[in-house]
Amino acid sequence: MYEQSVQLIKEKCIGCTNCIKRCPTEAIRVQNGKALIISDRCLDCGECIRVCQSNAKIAISDPISITDSYDYKIAIPAPSLYGIADSHVSTDRILTGLKHLGFDDVFEVASAAEIITKRTNEFLEMNEKDGPFISSSCPAVVRLVQVRFPSLIDQIIPFISPMELAARIARKRAGDDKGKVGVFFISPCAAKFSEIRNPHHFEESQVDGVIGIKDIQVLLQRLIKSDMETEKLAVASGVGVGWGRIDGEARALASDGVISVDGISNIISLLEELENGKIDQFRFIELMACPGGCVGGPMTLVNPYVAKSIIQDRWDETGSEVCGDCGTLNDIRWTEELPSCNFMKLDDNYEKAMQMLQRLELIEKSLPGIDCGSCGAPSCHAFAEDIVRGRAVITSCIFVLRKKIRQLTDEMIKLEDVLPYRLDKDE
Ligand code: SF4
Ligand code: SF4
Protein backbone atom coordinates (compact mmCIF):
# COMPACT_ATOMS: atom_id res chain seq x y z
CA MET A 1 0.00 0.00 0.00
CA TYR A 2 1.19 3.52 -0.89
CA GLU A 3 2.49 5.37 2.17
CA GLN A 4 1.47 8.98 1.72
CA SER A 5 2.42 12.27 3.37
CA VAL A 6 -0.87 14.15 3.04
CA GLN A 7 -3.17 13.39 5.97
CA LEU A 8 -6.48 14.59 7.39
CA ILE A 9 -6.89 16.19 10.81
CA LYS A 10 -10.33 14.72 11.45
CA GLU A 11 -11.35 17.18 14.17
CA LYS A 12 -10.82 20.13 11.83
CA CYS A 13 -12.71 18.71 8.84
CA ILE A 14 -16.23 20.12 8.49
CA GLY A 15 -17.14 17.89 5.54
CA CYS A 16 -17.63 20.84 3.19
CA THR A 17 -16.59 18.72 0.11
CA ASN A 18 -14.41 21.55 -1.31
CA CYS A 19 -11.47 19.21 -1.69
CA ILE A 20 -13.15 16.31 -3.47
CA LYS A 21 -13.43 18.00 -6.84
CA ARG A 22 -9.92 19.46 -6.80
CA CYS A 23 -8.20 16.11 -6.35
CA PRO A 24 -6.67 15.13 -9.72
CA THR A 25 -7.14 11.42 -9.14
CA GLU A 26 -10.55 11.46 -7.42
CA ALA A 27 -8.84 10.14 -4.27
CA ILE A 28 -11.07 11.92 -1.73
CA ARG A 29 -14.53 11.05 -0.45
CA VAL A 30 -16.58 12.66 2.29
CA GLN A 31 -18.30 10.06 4.42
CA ASN A 32 -20.13 10.63 7.69
CA GLY A 33 -19.22 14.30 7.47
CA LYS A 34 -15.46 13.75 7.24
CA ALA A 35 -13.01 13.60 4.32
CA LEU A 36 -11.23 10.34 3.62
CA ILE A 37 -8.21 9.85 1.35
CA ILE A 38 -7.98 6.65 -0.71
CA SER A 39 -4.20 6.10 -0.32
CA ASP A 40 -3.61 4.11 -3.50
CA ARG A 41 -4.88 7.00 -5.59
CA CYS A 42 -3.08 9.82 -3.79
CA LEU A 43 -0.18 11.62 -5.52
CA ASP A 44 0.76 13.79 -2.53
CA CYS A 45 0.35 16.75 -4.85
CA GLY A 46 -0.86 18.91 -1.95
CA GLU A 47 -3.80 20.33 -3.92
CA CYS A 48 -6.29 19.43 -1.17
CA ILE A 49 -4.10 21.20 1.41
CA ARG A 50 -4.23 24.38 -0.67
CA VAL A 51 -8.04 24.39 -1.04
CA CYS A 52 -9.07 23.43 2.48
CA GLN A 53 -10.29 26.56 4.27
CA SER A 54 -10.41 24.67 7.58
CA ASN A 55 -6.73 23.67 7.46
CA ALA A 56 -7.84 20.09 7.92
CA LYS A 57 -5.24 18.64 5.56
CA ILE A 58 -1.52 18.60 6.33
CA ALA A 59 1.66 17.19 4.81
CA ILE A 60 3.53 15.17 7.37
CA SER A 61 7.31 14.98 7.42
CA ASP A 62 9.92 13.66 9.82
CA PRO A 63 10.63 15.62 13.01
CA ILE A 64 14.14 17.05 13.34
CA SER A 65 14.64 14.69 16.30
CA ILE A 66 14.92 11.86 13.73
CA THR A 67 18.55 12.96 13.29
CA ASP A 68 19.31 11.99 16.94
CA SER A 69 19.78 8.33 16.05
CA TYR A 70 22.79 9.01 13.81
CA ASP A 71 26.42 9.78 14.73
CA TYR A 72 27.04 11.92 11.65
CA LYS A 73 24.20 13.95 10.20
CA ILE A 74 24.15 15.46 6.71
CA ALA A 75 21.54 17.93 5.50
CA ILE A 76 20.77 17.94 1.77
CA PRO A 77 18.70 21.11 1.23
CA ALA A 78 16.35 21.52 -1.75
CA PRO A 79 17.23 24.50 -3.98
CA SER A 80 13.89 26.06 -2.96
CA LEU A 81 15.27 26.53 0.59
CA TYR A 82 17.25 29.47 -0.78
CA GLY A 83 13.95 31.32 -1.23
CA ILE A 84 13.53 31.79 2.55
CA ALA A 85 15.88 34.80 2.73
CA ASP A 86 16.41 37.83 0.51
CA SER A 87 19.04 37.38 -2.14
CA HIS A 88 21.47 39.71 -0.29
CA VAL A 89 21.78 36.87 2.27
CA SER A 90 24.32 34.48 0.76
CA THR A 91 23.57 30.79 0.23
CA ASP A 92 26.71 30.18 2.31
CA ARG A 93 24.96 31.85 5.24
CA ILE A 94 21.79 29.76 4.81
CA LEU A 95 23.87 26.58 4.66
CA THR A 96 25.91 27.65 7.71
CA GLY A 97 22.62 28.19 9.55
CA LEU A 98 21.68 24.60 8.71
CA LYS A 99 24.91 23.35 10.27
CA HIS A 100 24.14 25.38 13.40
CA LEU A 101 20.82 23.53 13.62
CA GLY A 102 22.85 20.40 14.42
CA PHE A 103 24.02 18.98 11.09
CA ASP A 104 27.67 17.96 10.70
CA ASP A 105 27.73 18.61 6.98
CA VAL A 106 25.61 19.91 4.13
CA PHE A 107 25.49 18.90 0.49
CA GLU A 108 23.41 20.95 -1.91
CA VAL A 109 20.74 19.17 -3.93
CA ALA A 110 21.39 21.98 -6.43
CA SER A 111 24.80 20.40 -7.14
CA ALA A 112 23.13 17.09 -7.93
CA ALA A 113 20.65 18.95 -10.14
CA GLU A 114 23.56 20.26 -12.20
CA ILE A 115 24.79 16.72 -12.81
CA ILE A 116 21.30 15.68 -13.87
CA THR A 117 21.15 18.67 -16.22
CA LYS A 118 24.33 17.47 -17.92
CA ARG A 119 23.08 13.90 -18.16
CA THR A 120 19.70 15.02 -19.49
CA ASN A 121 21.43 16.88 -22.31
CA GLU A 122 23.34 13.69 -23.15
CA PHE A 123 20.15 11.62 -22.96
CA LEU A 124 18.31 13.97 -25.30
CA GLU A 125 21.19 13.86 -27.77
CA MET A 126 21.29 10.06 -27.67
CA ASN A 127 17.53 9.85 -28.24
CA GLU A 128 17.29 12.61 -30.78
CA LYS A 129 14.65 10.90 -32.90
CA ASP A 130 12.32 10.02 -30.01
CA GLY A 131 10.36 12.09 -27.52
CA PRO A 132 8.99 14.39 -26.32
CA PHE A 133 10.52 13.38 -22.97
CA ILE A 134 9.07 14.23 -19.57
CA SER A 135 11.30 15.20 -16.64
CA SER A 136 11.26 12.75 -13.72
CA SER A 137 12.20 15.29 -11.05
CA CYS A 138 8.72 15.93 -9.60
CA PRO A 139 7.55 12.74 -7.82
CA ALA A 140 3.90 13.84 -7.87
CA VAL A 141 4.09 14.08 -11.68
CA VAL A 142 5.77 10.68 -11.98
CA ARG A 143 2.99 9.18 -9.89
CA LEU A 144 0.33 11.05 -11.88
CA VAL A 145 1.67 9.43 -15.04
CA GLN A 146 1.66 6.02 -13.30
CA VAL A 147 -1.95 6.30 -12.20
CA ARG A 148 -3.61 8.36 -14.95
CA PHE A 149 -1.39 8.26 -18.04
CA PRO A 150 0.35 4.85 -18.01
CA SER A 151 0.77 5.00 -21.80
CA LEU A 152 3.27 7.84 -21.26
CA ILE A 153 5.52 5.97 -18.79
CA ASP A 154 8.15 5.30 -21.48
CA GLN A 155 8.40 9.02 -22.17
CA ILE A 156 9.62 9.79 -18.65
CA ILE A 157 13.40 10.29 -18.52
CA PRO A 158 14.46 7.31 -16.36
CA PHE A 159 16.71 9.21 -13.94
CA ILE A 160 16.67 9.33 -10.16
CA SER A 161 15.79 12.71 -8.64
CA PRO A 162 18.40 15.31 -7.63
CA MET A 163 17.46 14.55 -3.99
CA GLU A 164 18.36 10.88 -4.36
CA LEU A 165 21.58 11.63 -6.25
CA ALA A 166 22.61 14.20 -3.63
CA ALA A 167 22.00 11.61 -0.88
CA ARG A 168 24.17 9.05 -2.68
CA ILE A 169 27.05 11.51 -3.19
CA ALA A 170 26.83 12.89 0.36
CA ARG A 171 26.83 9.40 1.88
CA LYS A 172 29.80 8.34 -0.23
CA ARG A 173 31.72 11.46 0.78
CA ALA A 174 31.08 10.64 4.44
CA GLY A 175 32.36 7.09 4.21
CA ASP A 176 29.19 5.30 3.09
CA ASP A 177 28.30 3.94 6.52
CA LYS A 178 24.54 3.35 6.51
CA GLY A 179 23.42 3.22 10.12
CA LYS A 180 25.90 5.78 11.50
CA VAL A 181 25.62 8.41 8.77
CA GLY A 182 22.16 9.91 8.42
CA VAL A 183 21.19 11.90 5.30
CA PHE A 184 18.20 14.24 5.59
CA PHE A 185 16.41 16.08 2.84
CA ILE A 186 15.27 19.60 3.74
CA SER A 187 12.07 19.58 1.78
CA PRO A 188 9.40 21.88 0.35
CA CYS A 189 7.51 18.85 -0.90
CA ALA A 190 5.04 16.30 0.47
CA ALA A 191 5.67 13.86 -2.38
CA LYS A 192 9.38 13.55 -1.48
CA PHE A 193 8.37 12.06 1.87
CA SER A 194 6.47 9.39 -0.05
CA GLU A 195 9.19 8.95 -2.71
CA ILE A 196 11.71 7.65 -0.17
CA ARG A 197 9.12 5.30 1.33
CA ASN A 198 7.79 3.95 -1.96
CA PRO A 199 10.79 3.81 -4.34
CA HIS A 200 9.25 1.92 -7.28
CA HIS A 201 12.09 2.55 -9.71
CA PHE A 202 15.20 1.84 -7.62
CA GLU A 203 15.90 -0.53 -4.77
CA GLU A 204 16.31 1.57 -1.67
CA SER A 205 16.46 5.29 -1.00
CA GLN A 206 19.67 6.69 0.51
CA VAL A 207 17.66 9.41 2.25
CA ASP A 208 17.03 8.63 5.93
CA GLY A 209 14.46 11.32 6.59
CA VAL A 210 12.54 14.23 5.07
CA ILE A 211 12.34 17.38 7.20
CA GLY A 212 9.87 20.04 6.08
CA ILE A 213 11.27 23.53 5.43
CA LYS A 214 8.32 24.90 7.45
CA ASP A 215 9.53 23.06 10.55
CA ILE A 216 12.97 24.69 10.59
CA GLN A 217 12.39 27.96 8.78
CA VAL A 218 11.81 30.19 11.82
CA LEU A 219 14.88 28.84 13.65
CA LEU A 220 16.98 29.09 10.51
CA GLN A 221 15.94 32.68 9.86
CA ARG A 222 16.86 33.54 13.45
CA LEU A 223 20.31 31.98 12.99
CA ILE A 224 20.82 33.86 9.71
CA LYS A 225 20.21 37.13 11.57
CA SER A 226 22.47 36.12 14.48
CA ASP A 227 26.19 36.87 14.76
CA MET A 228 27.27 33.37 13.65
CA GLU A 229 30.30 33.27 11.39
CA THR A 230 29.57 32.32 7.79
CA GLU A 231 31.38 29.27 6.42
CA LYS A 232 32.19 28.80 2.74
CA LEU A 233 29.89 25.89 1.93
CA ALA A 234 27.97 26.68 -1.27
CA VAL A 235 29.31 25.13 -4.46
CA ALA A 236 26.29 24.98 -6.77
CA SER A 237 25.88 27.51 -9.56
CA GLY A 238 22.73 29.23 -10.76
CA VAL A 239 22.01 26.23 -13.00
CA GLY A 240 21.32 24.01 -9.97
CA VAL A 241 19.82 26.72 -7.77
CA GLY A 242 17.33 27.59 -10.51
CA TRP A 243 15.74 24.13 -10.21
CA GLY A 244 13.92 25.48 -7.14
CA ARG A 245 11.42 27.27 -9.37
CA ILE A 246 9.39 26.38 -12.43
CA ASP A 247 11.33 26.85 -15.66
CA GLY A 248 14.68 26.33 -13.88
CA GLU A 249 15.21 22.80 -15.08
CA ALA A 250 14.20 23.50 -18.68
CA ARG A 251 16.26 26.70 -18.90
CA ALA A 252 19.29 24.95 -17.42
CA LEU A 253 19.33 22.66 -20.47
CA ALA A 254 20.02 25.70 -22.65
CA SER A 255 18.38 24.00 -25.58
CA ASP A 256 15.47 24.60 -27.95
CA GLY A 257 12.19 22.68 -27.84
CA VAL A 258 11.61 22.83 -24.08
CA ILE A 259 8.41 23.68 -22.23
CA SER A 260 7.65 24.17 -18.52
CA VAL A 261 4.22 23.74 -16.94
CA ASP A 262 3.26 24.14 -13.28
CA GLY A 263 0.04 23.39 -11.36
CA ILE A 264 -1.60 20.00 -11.42
CA SER A 265 -4.63 20.91 -13.56
CA ASN A 266 -2.42 22.57 -16.23
CA ILE A 267 -0.24 19.48 -16.24
CA ILE A 268 -3.24 17.18 -16.72
CA SER A 269 -4.41 19.24 -19.72
CA LEU A 270 -0.95 19.03 -21.26
CA LEU A 271 -0.58 15.29 -20.63
CA GLU A 272 -4.01 14.69 -22.19
CA GLU A 273 -2.86 16.46 -25.33
CA LEU A 274 0.43 14.59 -25.27
CA GLU A 275 -1.41 11.28 -24.94
CA ASN A 276 -3.63 12.20 -27.89
CA GLY A 277 -0.56 12.95 -30.03
CA LYS A 278 -1.37 16.66 -30.26
CA ILE A 279 2.00 17.76 -28.85
CA ASP A 280 5.16 16.73 -30.64
CA GLN A 281 7.02 19.99 -31.20
CA PHE A 282 8.89 19.73 -27.87
CA ARG A 283 11.90 17.63 -26.94
CA PHE A 284 11.75 18.14 -23.19
CA ILE A 285 8.79 18.78 -20.92
CA GLU A 286 9.33 20.10 -17.39
CA LEU A 287 6.30 19.52 -15.18
CA MET A 288 6.00 20.72 -11.59
CA ALA A 289 2.86 19.87 -9.61
CA CYS A 290 3.14 22.88 -7.29
CA PRO A 291 2.34 26.42 -8.42
CA GLY A 292 5.61 28.19 -9.19
CA GLY A 293 7.53 24.90 -8.93
CA CYS A 294 9.13 23.57 -5.71
CA VAL A 295 9.00 27.04 -4.12
CA GLY A 296 5.21 26.52 -4.00
CA GLY A 297 5.41 23.17 -2.18
CA PRO A 298 3.09 22.57 0.80
CA MET A 299 6.04 22.42 3.21
CA THR A 300 7.16 25.99 2.50
CA LEU A 301 6.02 29.18 4.22
CA VAL A 302 7.24 31.92 1.85
CA ASN A 303 4.90 33.20 -0.86
CA PRO A 304 5.89 31.19 -3.97
CA TYR A 305 6.09 34.24 -6.21
CA VAL A 306 8.40 36.02 -3.77
CA ALA A 307 10.57 32.89 -3.44
CA LYS A 308 10.60 32.47 -7.23
CA SER A 309 11.96 35.97 -7.69
CA ILE A 310 14.63 35.42 -4.98
CA ILE A 311 15.76 32.21 -6.70
CA GLN A 312 15.98 34.08 -10.00
CA ASP A 313 18.16 36.79 -8.39
CA ARG A 314 20.44 34.13 -6.93
CA TRP A 315 20.72 32.47 -10.34
CA ASP A 316 21.69 35.78 -11.95
CA GLU A 317 24.25 36.49 -9.22
CA THR A 318 25.81 33.02 -9.09
CA GLY A 319 26.12 32.52 -12.84
CA SER A 320 25.91 29.31 -14.81
CA GLU A 321 29.38 27.84 -14.32
CA VAL A 322 28.52 24.30 -13.23
CA CYS A 323 30.48 22.57 -10.47
CA GLY A 324 32.66 19.47 -10.93
CA ASP A 325 31.13 16.34 -12.39
CA CYS A 326 30.46 13.08 -10.56
CA GLY A 327 29.55 9.68 -11.98
CA THR A 328 28.20 8.58 -15.30
CA LEU A 329 24.85 8.28 -17.05
CA ASN A 330 24.42 4.75 -15.73
CA ASP A 331 24.85 5.92 -12.13
CA ILE A 332 21.65 7.91 -12.24
CA ARG A 333 19.41 5.61 -14.29
CA TRP A 334 16.49 3.85 -12.63
CA THR A 335 17.39 0.26 -11.92
CA GLU A 336 13.82 -0.96 -12.23
CA GLU A 337 11.04 -0.25 -14.68
CA LEU A 338 8.36 2.11 -13.47
CA PRO A 339 5.12 0.12 -13.08
CA SER A 340 1.71 1.53 -13.92
CA CYS A 341 -0.75 1.79 -11.02
CA ASN A 342 -4.08 1.17 -12.65
CA PHE A 343 -6.44 2.05 -9.83
CA MET A 344 -9.36 1.99 -12.25
CA LYS A 345 -9.12 -1.80 -12.54
CA LEU A 346 -12.25 -3.14 -10.81
CA ASP A 347 -10.95 -6.66 -10.22
CA ASP A 348 -7.98 -8.86 -11.15
CA ASN A 349 -10.38 -11.45 -12.55
CA TYR A 350 -11.37 -10.33 -16.05
CA GLU A 351 -14.90 -11.81 -15.98
CA LYS A 352 -15.68 -10.36 -12.61
CA ALA A 353 -14.28 -6.98 -13.65
CA MET A 354 -16.57 -6.99 -16.72
CA GLN A 355 -19.62 -7.79 -14.60
CA MET A 356 -18.74 -5.00 -12.23
CA LEU A 357 -18.26 -2.61 -15.14
CA GLN A 358 -21.72 -3.46 -16.53
CA ARG A 359 -23.27 -2.87 -13.12
CA LEU A 360 -21.34 0.39 -12.77
CA GLU A 361 -22.71 1.63 -16.12
CA LEU A 362 -26.27 0.75 -15.13
CA ILE A 363 -25.95 2.53 -11.79
CA GLU A 364 -24.36 5.57 -13.44
CA LYS A 365 -27.31 5.81 -15.85
CA SER A 366 -29.73 5.92 -12.91
CA LEU A 367 -27.87 8.88 -11.35
CA PRO A 368 -28.60 12.53 -12.27
CA GLY A 369 -25.20 13.03 -13.98
CA ILE A 370 -24.64 16.53 -12.57
CA ASP A 371 -21.61 15.67 -10.40
CA CYS A 372 -22.99 17.75 -7.50
CA GLY A 373 -20.76 16.06 -4.91
CA SER A 374 -23.47 15.90 -2.25
CA CYS A 375 -23.01 12.12 -1.99
CA GLY A 376 -19.40 12.75 -0.92
CA ALA A 377 -17.89 11.49 -4.19
CA PRO A 378 -16.41 13.92 -6.77
CA SER A 379 -18.58 12.72 -9.68
CA CYS A 380 -21.55 10.48 -10.43
CA HIS A 381 -19.15 8.07 -12.13
CA ALA A 382 -16.91 7.90 -9.03
CA PHE A 383 -20.02 7.36 -6.86
CA ALA A 384 -21.25 4.51 -9.10
CA GLU A 385 -17.78 2.98 -8.86
CA ASP A 386 -17.86 3.28 -5.05
CA ILE A 387 -21.21 1.43 -4.97
CA VAL A 388 -19.86 -1.37 -7.16
CA ARG A 389 -16.76 -1.63 -4.97
CA GLY A 390 -18.98 -1.81 -1.85
CA ARG A 391 -17.79 1.54 -0.50
CA ALA A 392 -21.12 3.40 -0.76
CA VAL A 393 -24.89 2.82 -0.90
CA ILE A 394 -27.08 4.33 -3.61
CA THR A 395 -29.32 6.18 -1.15
CA SER A 396 -26.39 8.50 -0.34
CA CYS A 397 -27.44 10.28 -3.56
CA ILE A 398 -30.04 12.85 -2.48
CA PHE A 399 -31.76 12.72 -5.90
CA VAL A 400 -32.17 8.95 -5.72
CA LEU A 401 -33.27 9.22 -2.09
CA ARG A 402 -35.84 11.92 -2.92
CA LYS A 403 -37.20 9.79 -5.78
CA LYS A 404 -37.50 6.78 -3.50
CA ILE A 405 -39.29 8.84 -0.81
CA ARG A 406 -41.72 10.15 -3.45
CA GLN A 407 -42.40 6.62 -4.70
CA LEU A 408 -42.99 5.42 -1.13
CA THR A 409 -45.33 8.34 -0.41
CA ASP A 410 -47.33 7.64 -3.61
CA GLU A 411 -47.62 3.99 -2.64
CA MET A 412 -48.81 4.92 0.88
CA ILE A 413 -51.46 7.23 -0.56
CA LYS A 414 -52.61 4.48 -2.91
CA LEU A 415 -52.67 2.00 -0.02
CA GLU A 416 -54.82 4.38 2.02
CA ASP A 417 -57.49 4.20 -0.72
CA VAL A 418 -57.66 0.43 -0.51
CA LEU A 419 -57.65 0.08 3.27
CA PRO A 420 -60.52 -2.14 4.60
CA TYR A 421 -63.48 0.00 5.81
CA ARG A 422 -63.22 -0.90 9.50
CA LEU A 423 -59.51 -0.19 9.78
CA ASP A 424 -60.13 3.21 8.18
CA LYS A 425 -62.24 4.33 11.23
CA ASP A 426 -61.12 5.25 14.72
CA GLU A 427 -63.89 3.40 16.54
S1 SF4 B 1 -11.98 20.88 2.14
FE1 SF4 B 1 -12.05 18.64 2.49
S2 SF4 B 1 -10.72 18.32 4.28
FE2 SF4 B 1 -11.17 20.52 4.22
S3 SF4 B 1 -12.98 20.73 5.59
FE3 SF4 B 1 -13.76 20.49 3.49
S4 SF4 B 1 -14.13 18.26 3.31
FE4 SF4 B 1 -12.79 18.55 5.10
S1 SF4 C 1 -2.66 15.21 -2.10
FE1 SF4 C 1 -3.44 15.49 -4.20
S2 SF4 C 1 -3.84 13.39 -4.92
FE2 SF4 C 1 -3.64 13.27 -2.67
S3 SF4 C 1 -5.76 13.45 -1.91
FE3 SF4 C 1 -4.88 15.54 -1.92
S4 SF4 C 1 -5.49 16.39 -3.91
FE4 SF4 C 1 -5.76 14.16 -4.05
Image (cartoon, helix red, strand yellow):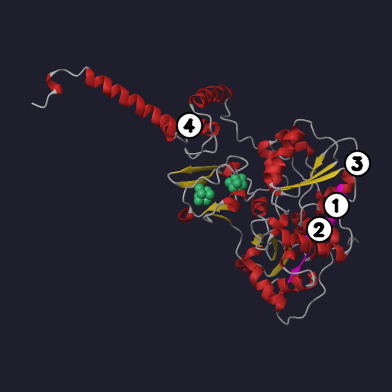
Q: Earlier in the sequence, mark 2 or mark 4?
A: 2
Quarter the N terminus occupies: top right
Q: Earlier in the sequence, mark 1 or mark 4?
A: 1
Range shown magenta: 104-120
Vertical placement of residue 147 versus 361, above or below: below
Circles 1 and 2 in contact, beta carbons < 8 Å? yes
Q: Is residue 118 left or right of residue 42?
A: right
Q: Earlier in the sequence, mark 3 or mark 4?
A: 3
Which numbered mark, 2 or 4, is in the foreground of this view? Answer: 2
Quarter the C terminus occupies: top left
- Which amino acid is tagged 4? Ile
Q: Earlier in the sequence, mark 3 or mark 1?
A: 3
Q: Earlier in the sequence, mark 1 or mark 2?
A: 2
Extreme residue in the left direction: 427
Secondary structure at badge 3 equals: helix
Rounded to the nearest angstrom, the CA distance separating label 3 from label 1 is 19 Å
Q: Which residue is mark 2?
A: 242
Q: Which residue is mark 4?
A: 387
Rounded to the nearest angstrom, the CA distance separating label 3 from label 4 is 49 Å
Q: Which residue is mark 1?
A: 251
